[in-house]
Amino acid sequence: MTGKGTGAVGSTASVRLLVTLIDDRQPGYRQHAESVARLTRMVGLQLGLDACALENLRMSAFLHDIGSLRLPFGHVGSRWKLAAEERRIWETHPVTGACLVRILDLPSEVECAILGHHERWDGSGYPNGLSRTQVPLPGRILGVCDAYDEALSGQLEMNAQRLSESEALDRLRSEARRRFDQNIVLALSDALDQEREISALTRVVG
Ligand SMILES: [Fe+2]
Protein backbone atom coordinates (compact mmCIF):
# COMPACT_ATOMS: atom_id res chain seq x y z
CA MET A 1 0.00 0.00 0.00
CA THR A 2 1.40 3.38 -0.91
CA GLY A 3 1.34 6.49 1.23
CA LYS A 4 -0.89 9.54 0.85
CA GLY A 5 -0.18 12.98 2.18
CA THR A 6 0.00 13.47 5.93
CA GLY A 7 -2.45 16.39 5.73
CA ALA A 8 -3.05 18.87 8.54
CA VAL A 9 -4.06 16.03 10.86
CA GLY A 10 -0.47 14.79 10.76
CA SER A 11 0.68 17.90 12.61
CA THR A 12 1.92 17.54 16.17
CA ALA A 13 -0.90 19.69 17.58
CA SER A 14 -3.58 17.62 15.88
CA VAL A 15 -2.08 14.34 17.02
CA ARG A 16 -1.82 15.74 20.56
CA LEU A 17 -5.50 16.69 20.47
CA LEU A 18 -6.53 13.24 19.29
CA VAL A 19 -4.38 11.57 21.98
CA THR A 20 -6.09 13.75 24.59
CA LEU A 21 -9.51 12.61 23.36
CA ILE A 22 -8.46 8.94 23.42
CA ASP A 23 -6.98 9.43 26.91
CA ASP A 24 -10.41 10.63 28.08
CA ARG A 25 -11.83 7.26 27.03
CA GLN A 26 -8.87 5.18 28.18
CA PRO A 27 -7.16 6.76 31.20
CA GLY A 28 -3.40 6.24 30.99
CA TYR A 29 -3.47 6.07 27.20
CA ARG A 30 -1.27 9.15 26.71
CA GLN A 31 1.63 7.71 28.67
CA HIS A 32 1.19 4.31 27.01
CA ALA A 33 1.11 5.88 23.53
CA GLU A 34 4.27 7.91 24.25
CA SER A 35 6.05 4.72 25.35
CA VAL A 36 4.84 2.81 22.29
CA ALA A 37 6.00 5.68 20.04
CA ARG A 38 9.49 5.54 21.61
CA LEU A 39 9.64 1.76 21.25
CA THR A 40 8.43 1.69 17.64
CA ARG A 41 11.12 4.24 16.75
CA MET A 42 13.79 2.08 18.40
CA VAL A 43 12.59 -1.02 16.54
CA GLY A 44 12.25 0.90 13.26
CA LEU A 45 15.82 2.18 13.53
CA GLN A 46 17.03 -1.32 14.39
CA LEU A 47 15.33 -2.63 11.24
CA GLY A 48 16.81 0.16 9.11
CA LEU A 49 13.50 1.82 8.20
CA ASP A 50 13.66 5.21 6.50
CA ALA A 51 12.55 8.54 7.98
CA CYS A 52 9.12 8.42 6.34
CA ALA A 53 8.41 4.93 7.70
CA LEU A 54 9.59 6.03 11.15
CA GLU A 55 7.26 9.03 11.09
CA ASN A 56 4.32 6.84 10.04
CA LEU A 57 5.14 4.45 12.88
CA ARG A 58 5.23 7.37 15.33
CA MET A 59 1.80 8.52 14.24
CA SER A 60 0.45 4.96 14.35
CA ALA A 61 1.77 4.55 17.88
CA PHE A 62 0.10 7.73 19.11
CA LEU A 63 -3.21 6.88 17.42
CA HIS A 64 -3.28 3.07 17.61
CA ASP A 65 -6.48 2.98 19.72
CA ILE A 66 -8.18 5.95 18.03
CA GLY A 67 -11.03 3.54 17.22
CA SER A 68 -12.01 3.64 20.91
CA LEU A 69 -13.42 7.13 20.25
CA ARG A 70 -16.35 5.52 18.48
CA LEU A 71 -17.13 2.80 20.99
CA PRO A 72 -20.76 2.98 22.16
CA PHE A 73 -19.72 2.96 25.82
CA GLY A 74 -17.82 5.47 27.93
CA HIS A 75 -14.57 4.76 29.72
CA VAL A 76 -12.47 1.72 28.92
CA GLY A 77 -10.46 1.19 32.12
CA SER A 78 -9.17 -2.25 31.18
CA ARG A 79 -10.37 -4.22 28.19
CA TRP A 80 -10.05 -7.36 30.33
CA LYS A 81 -12.82 -6.09 32.61
CA LEU A 82 -15.31 -5.56 29.79
CA ALA A 83 -18.42 -7.74 29.61
CA ALA A 84 -18.44 -10.28 26.77
CA GLU A 85 -20.58 -8.15 24.46
CA GLU A 86 -18.54 -5.02 25.22
CA ARG A 87 -15.37 -6.98 24.53
CA ARG A 88 -16.74 -8.11 21.17
CA ILE A 89 -17.43 -4.48 20.34
CA TRP A 90 -13.99 -3.47 21.65
CA GLU A 91 -12.40 -5.85 19.16
CA THR A 92 -13.82 -3.74 16.33
CA HIS A 93 -11.56 -0.82 17.32
CA PRO A 94 -8.77 -1.61 14.81
CA VAL A 95 -11.29 -1.46 11.94
CA THR A 96 -12.94 1.69 13.28
CA GLY A 97 -9.51 3.24 13.86
CA ALA A 98 -8.39 2.43 10.31
CA CYS A 99 -11.60 4.04 8.96
CA LEU A 100 -10.97 7.16 11.06
CA VAL A 101 -7.39 7.62 9.86
CA ARG A 102 -8.60 7.16 6.27
CA ILE A 103 -11.15 9.93 6.81
CA LEU A 104 -8.38 12.05 8.34
CA ASP A 105 -6.30 11.51 5.17
CA LEU A 106 -3.36 10.09 7.10
CA PRO A 107 -0.88 7.93 5.16
CA SER A 108 -2.15 4.46 4.29
CA GLU A 109 0.77 2.94 6.23
CA VAL A 110 -0.76 4.42 9.40
CA GLU A 111 -4.10 2.83 8.50
CA CYS A 112 -2.40 -0.56 7.92
CA ALA A 113 -0.52 -0.40 11.21
CA ILE A 114 -3.63 0.43 13.20
CA LEU A 115 -5.68 -2.24 11.44
CA GLY A 116 -3.02 -4.88 12.12
CA HIS A 117 -1.90 -4.17 15.67
CA HIS A 118 -4.00 -6.93 17.29
CA GLU A 119 -3.39 -9.60 14.64
CA ARG A 120 -1.18 -12.51 15.74
CA TRP A 121 1.60 -14.43 14.01
CA ASP A 122 -0.43 -17.68 14.16
CA GLY A 123 -3.61 -16.08 12.81
CA SER A 124 -5.50 -16.11 16.14
CA GLY A 125 -5.75 -12.33 16.45
CA TYR A 126 -8.35 -9.83 15.34
CA PRO A 127 -10.00 -8.27 13.36
CA ASN A 128 -9.16 -10.34 10.27
CA GLY A 129 -7.27 -13.38 11.59
CA LEU A 130 -4.30 -12.63 9.34
CA SER A 131 -1.13 -14.60 10.00
CA ARG A 132 2.62 -14.21 9.61
CA THR A 133 3.61 -11.67 6.93
CA GLN A 134 0.01 -11.21 5.80
CA VAL A 135 0.06 -8.59 8.54
CA PRO A 136 1.94 -5.57 7.15
CA LEU A 137 5.27 -4.87 8.87
CA PRO A 138 4.10 -1.64 10.61
CA GLY A 139 1.22 -3.58 12.20
CA ARG A 140 3.58 -6.30 13.45
CA ILE A 141 5.97 -3.70 14.90
CA LEU A 142 3.12 -1.81 16.56
CA GLY A 143 1.70 -5.05 17.98
CA VAL A 144 4.99 -6.07 19.61
CA CYS A 145 5.65 -2.60 21.09
CA ASP A 146 2.05 -2.26 22.31
CA ALA A 147 2.24 -5.67 24.01
CA TYR A 148 5.65 -4.95 25.58
CA ASP A 149 4.41 -1.74 27.18
CA GLU A 150 1.19 -3.48 28.28
CA ALA A 151 3.30 -6.19 29.94
CA LEU A 152 5.16 -3.50 31.90
CA SER A 153 1.86 -2.03 33.09
CA GLY A 154 0.14 -5.35 33.83
CA GLN A 155 -2.38 -5.01 31.01
CA LEU A 156 -1.15 -7.75 28.68
CA GLU A 157 -3.68 -10.30 29.89
CA MET A 158 -6.50 -10.76 32.36
CA ASN A 159 -5.11 -10.61 35.93
CA ALA A 160 -1.59 -10.04 34.64
CA GLN A 161 1.06 -8.67 37.00
CA ARG A 162 3.25 -5.72 36.12
CA LEU A 163 6.45 -7.21 34.70
CA SER A 164 10.00 -5.88 34.85
CA GLU A 165 11.66 -5.02 31.52
CA SER A 166 13.52 -8.34 31.40
CA GLU A 167 10.40 -10.30 32.40
CA ALA A 168 8.37 -8.49 29.72
CA LEU A 169 10.95 -9.33 27.08
CA ASP A 170 11.08 -12.96 28.21
CA ARG A 171 7.31 -13.06 27.94
CA LEU A 172 7.39 -11.72 24.38
CA ARG A 173 10.18 -14.13 23.45
CA SER A 174 8.15 -17.04 24.81
CA GLU A 175 5.21 -15.97 22.65
CA ALA A 176 7.23 -15.31 19.49
CA ARG A 177 6.04 -17.39 16.53
CA ARG A 178 2.66 -17.89 18.22
CA ARG A 179 1.66 -14.32 18.86
CA PHE A 180 4.52 -12.16 17.57
CA ASP A 181 6.99 -11.93 14.70
CA GLN A 182 10.18 -13.22 16.35
CA ASN A 183 12.38 -10.95 14.21
CA ILE A 184 10.62 -7.90 15.64
CA VAL A 185 10.87 -9.23 19.21
CA LEU A 186 14.60 -9.70 18.55
CA ALA A 187 14.90 -6.16 17.14
CA LEU A 188 13.20 -4.76 20.24
CA SER A 189 15.45 -6.81 22.50
CA ASP A 190 18.59 -5.62 20.67
CA ALA A 191 17.41 -1.99 20.70
CA LEU A 192 16.71 -2.10 24.46
CA ASP A 193 20.13 -3.71 25.08
CA GLN A 194 21.81 -0.92 23.09
CA GLU A 195 19.86 1.73 24.99
CA ARG A 196 20.97 0.21 28.30
CA GLU A 197 24.61 0.08 27.14
CA ILE A 198 24.51 3.72 26.03
CA SER A 199 22.97 4.90 29.28
CA ALA A 200 25.56 2.88 31.28
CA LEU A 201 28.37 4.46 29.23
CA THR A 202 26.85 7.91 29.70
CA ARG A 203 26.82 7.37 33.47
CA VAL A 204 30.48 6.31 33.45
CA VAL A 205 31.58 9.24 31.22
CA GLY A 206 29.35 11.74 33.03
FE1 LIG B 1 -5.55 -1.64 20.42
Image (cartoon, rainbow, N blue to C red):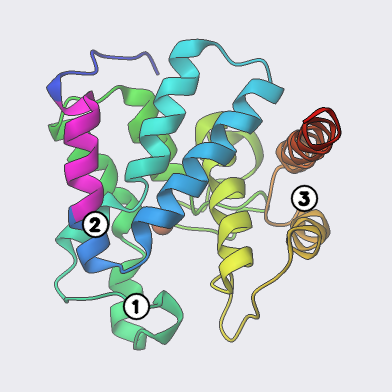
Looking at the picture, tell me which residue is in the foreground, 151 or 180. Answer: 151
Rendered image: mark on residue 69: none
In 3D space, how far apart are the residues under numbered discs 1 and 3 (Cα atoms)?
29 Å
Rendered image: mark on residue 22: 2
Rendered image: mark on residue 77: 1
**Residue at coordinates 75% horizontally, 40% vertically from top-left?**
192
Q: x, y (%) of residue 40?
A: 55, 36
Which quarter shows the N terminus? top left
Residue pointed to by mark 3: 177
Q: Find residue 141 and report its image quarter.
A: top right
User: What amino acid does circle 1 point to?
Assistant: Gly
The earlier-in-sequence mark between 1 and 2 is: 2
The earlier-in-sequence mark between 2 and 3 is: 2
**Label 3 residue SS:** loop
Q: Is residue 15 magenta?
A: yes
User: What amino acid does circle 2 point to?
Assistant: Ile
Q: x, y (%) of residue 56?
A: 40, 25
